[in-house]
Amino acid sequence: MAAEKDTNARLGDVIIECDQVNKWFGDFHVLKDISVKVREREVVVVIGPSGSGKSTLIRCINRLEEHQEGKIAVDGVELTNDTKNINAIRREVGMVFQSFNLFPHLTVMDNITLAQRHVRRRPRREAEEVAMQLLERVGIPEQARKYPGQLSGGQQQRVAIARALAMNPKIMLFDEPTSALDPEMIKEVLDVMRELAYSGMTMMVVTHEMGFAREVADRVIFMDSGRIVEIGTPEHFFSNPNHERTKLFLSQILKH
Amino acid sequence: MEQVSRDPDLFYVAPREAPPARRPPALSVGVLGWLRENLFSSRTNSILTIITTVFIVWAGGSFLTWALRDAEWSVITTNLRLMMVGQYDPPQIWRVSLVALVTLFLCGMSVALAVGVSRSVLITLAVVVIAMLIVPVGAAQLPPPPLRYLVTLGLENGPMLFTGEAGQKITVAIEPLDDNTAASAEHTGYIENTAGLQNSRNAWNDIRAQVDAGTLDLSQYDLAFTIALVDAQGDVLAQANSTPEARADSLEATLPANGWYAVLTTLPEGSTAAGAAFVRMDGIYTFTTDLEAVATRTDRYGPIPASLCPARADCRQVAERDLRFEGARSLATYLGTQVGPFLEAIVLPVIIGIVTALAGAGLGVFARRSPDLRKRLLRWLLIAWVVTLIGSWFILRGFEGSSLLPVVPTSVWGGLLLTMVLTIVSIILSFPLGVLLALGRTSNLPILSAVCTIFIEVIRGVPFITILFFAKLIVPFFISATADIDQAIRMMVGMTIFTGAYLAEVVRGGLQIVPKGQIEASKALGLNPIQQTNLIVLPQALRAVIPAIMNQFVALFKDTSLVAIVGLFELLGIIDFIVNGQQQFRGLTREAYLFVGIIYFIISYAMSLASQWVERTGAGTANRL
Ligand SMILES: Nc1ncnc2c1ncn2[C@@H]1O[C@H](COP(=O)(O)OP(=O)(O)OP(=O)(O)O)[C@@H](O)[C@H]1O
Ligand SMILES: [Mg+2]
């Protein structure tokens, strides 16, 4: 397994670059001097206690949140207030949310084709073909004509992944994709994510699924109170953490 | 494996095979069981059931007695055209019919495409059509009720005109009122009630009042007069007399041809004799006087003969307009005299309407068979609706100098036509206005938001009638080029901004319930702000508030009656005009208002059904998540 992952040759150039990023919500300093680089085809898992700023960090990467200091560049494009840049980056970055955020008024098929048609300007037929392929990839082609409300949580999250993939993103961001799911459904979503990782997608994943992190991640980022405490390979991180805070955190979550 | 005997109350292992699923136990235990369970389950429930039933029977019974026996529905039959189109130029009414038919066609197609047409709907329509055809025919077979006019001094005694068919048997009898008890006797049948100060009904009421007061003694009967049945040329066919000695004479005749006839009453010249007598005519059919009925009557019987009626205004006729039914009537009489003529007046337009709607529905049902055809028809339908809605305005309104479509100014539009035009135009315009105001009010741009907020709050803070006055006075200033803008257009402007302001608040409520995650997801997919609003936020927000929106539209529909302030007569206004403005319909307010009430209800209910349908459609499941 280690051989499979840790090949520098497998990873490409730097595609996400955060340099001294700072962000405040009002007076609350939520991100403190965040610097991290993610390379093409790399899978980075972000963990940390609740409120440590994990969601905020990855939401800054596709500009759902604005950072106030520092620099974030995605695929060589720096994130500024320029809407053109923002749109360019959002087209390259797919995102999957904890609460799925599917569009409840559209069928599964329309959920997946909507952005393809209106943002990528694909003709309907082509968009539907792409959608069907993706639904097969996530294992629920038979649900295409249903509405999100008619699906189980795991199925909804897989549709959400298909919806993001339909835009052919170079990067996928996951914000606790399995936290709202029952154990049986967690597995079906993680399977899809694992397959995606092995297919070479660049991924940044916020998750509490340590098994997934251990198995799939190239690197693990540990955050606490808005700063990055430790970055390392999963082997190193889980068996031999350096920082006291990391040790404390791991001892707490591994107790279960 | 070691066998441990366990306490079966604490431990359990299910058998390997799951038991097969069973049907739920039957709930209903017959009619009695249902009654016991639902209506008489407890003492309170039983008491409530009994009280409610008694009330329903009492209220419903008295209402039905009134509606089926005492009500005088001729006010509806006679004024149908006024109620439908107001004073719209009669020769131009085909334009209204055309618009109505095209609309019905499209409605039928839309319903068929959207939900299909169930067999029960078809059966209902068939039953309605057949009933409408049968009842008038059956009613025509019934002998017409007797028809009376009063002969006494000081009362206009002109000829009483009627139409008859060859071979029709009629009887005219004199019923002297020569006995004080005769005054209080019930006379069942029509009594002449021509508009004007003195007519038989008024005179008879006077006589009864005087007898009751003891100032008149009917037994002093000195009256002597002749009645004669004459044809259109004035030739006498039969004759009868009344003298103080032989009072109750009568005549019988079989009419020789189709045409006009009259009963002439002649009092001896200079007679001062006292007394009163009814002339009772049997076997004569009354007629209505709306334009179409007059046209078909003239075709069949010729014009009103000048020899019988030198000054047309003086002629008394057996027109429903000029008669009033007195006394208790049987259901058969009711059907014959009330329902029959009404159905006869509406049966043709209604059947044409139903057939047209069914034709549209048929196309829709046919297209549903293939998804491709359905899609194409849907697109066509959308265009057709837009064209129809815009085109209708021009067809109804007409063009300056056009001979085919001369201008019919909106000031003469009225009745249901005006109500519908005002409602539909205001709905179409106020909806986008409301949405834009709501988006404006919730936008991040401070000035836009402030302007929208102020607009909404000001409009909502002012009574509707004030807005209409304002629209009446102010609109011309904004469009100075044509200083005299249709009053109807001004009213539409007023109604649009009023409804728009209310809708804006409703829509804003809808916008607030769309979760933030929806916008984040659409941003993350790269949709621009306009696409986010149009494709994600608005569809969900609007669907969530469909009932409230429809509420607003129904209110708008009913509030159209306020346009009376600029002298426009929509459905309610025209009723007011009929029952209060035309003397012979005085006192028929209940009938008239009940009729418009039914029309208002049918349309409001249709609107509510439509909204329920939109809520139910697959896409309307916005709140499932
Ligand atoms: N829009 C906001 N306005 C103000 N404070 C916010 C906002 N969003 C997040 N915060 C605060 O910022 C901090 C970091 O939030 P964030 O959601 O990034 O944490 P997290 O690491 O994702 O936590 P969790 O594991 O609970 O999701 C929290 O203390 C939170 O209360
Ligand atoms: Mg979070």
Image (tube, rainbow, N blue to C red):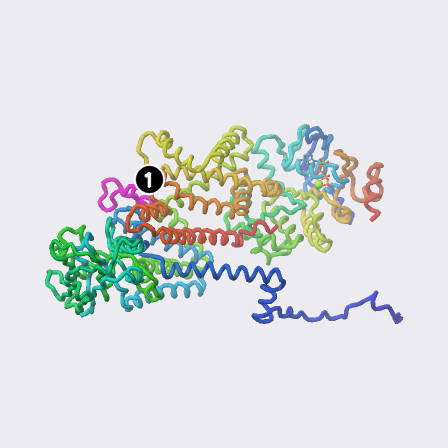
Other-residue count near label 1 (Cα within 10 Å), few / some / many at <14 / 14–19 / ≥20: few
- Residue B405: within the magenta? yes
Nearer the observer, B150 or A40: B150
Residue B321 appears in the rendering: no
Question: Can you tell me whether the CB of the residue at mark 1 lies under 8 Å from the nearest atom of ligand 1?
Answer: no
**Range of magenta residues:** B391-414
Relative to A242, does residue A154 appear above or below in the rendering? below
Q: Which residue is label 1 attached to?
A: B567
Name which residue type carries label 1. Gly
Residue A168 appears in the rendering: yes
In the picture, which quadrant includes the N terminus of chain B?
A: bottom right
Nearer the observer, B346 or B189: B189
Residue B382 pos. (x, y %): 41, 49
Q: Is residue B227 left or right of residue A68?
A: left
Residue sitting at x 66%, y 32%: A72
Residue B543 pos. (x, y %): 53, 47
Nearer the observer, B420 or B185: B185
Could you say which quadrant of the image residue B484 lies in?
Answer: top left
Q: Which chain does the numbered disc 1 sit on?
A: B
Could you say which quadrant of the image residue B143 lies in?
Answer: bottom left
Relative to B132, does residue A254 appear above or below in the rendering? above
Residue sitting at x 47%, y 34%: B462
Q: Is residue A10 left or right of residue A239?
A: left
- Residue B527: within the magenta? no
Q: Is residue B267 left or right of residue A69?
A: left
**Regarding ligand 2, which quadrant of the image does it lie in?**
top right
Residue B225 pos. (x, y %): 15, 60
How many numbered badges does the structure rendering display? Answer: 1
Q: Secondary structure at mark 1?
A: loop
Nearer the observer, A249 or B20: B20
Residue B312 pos. (x, y %): 16, 51
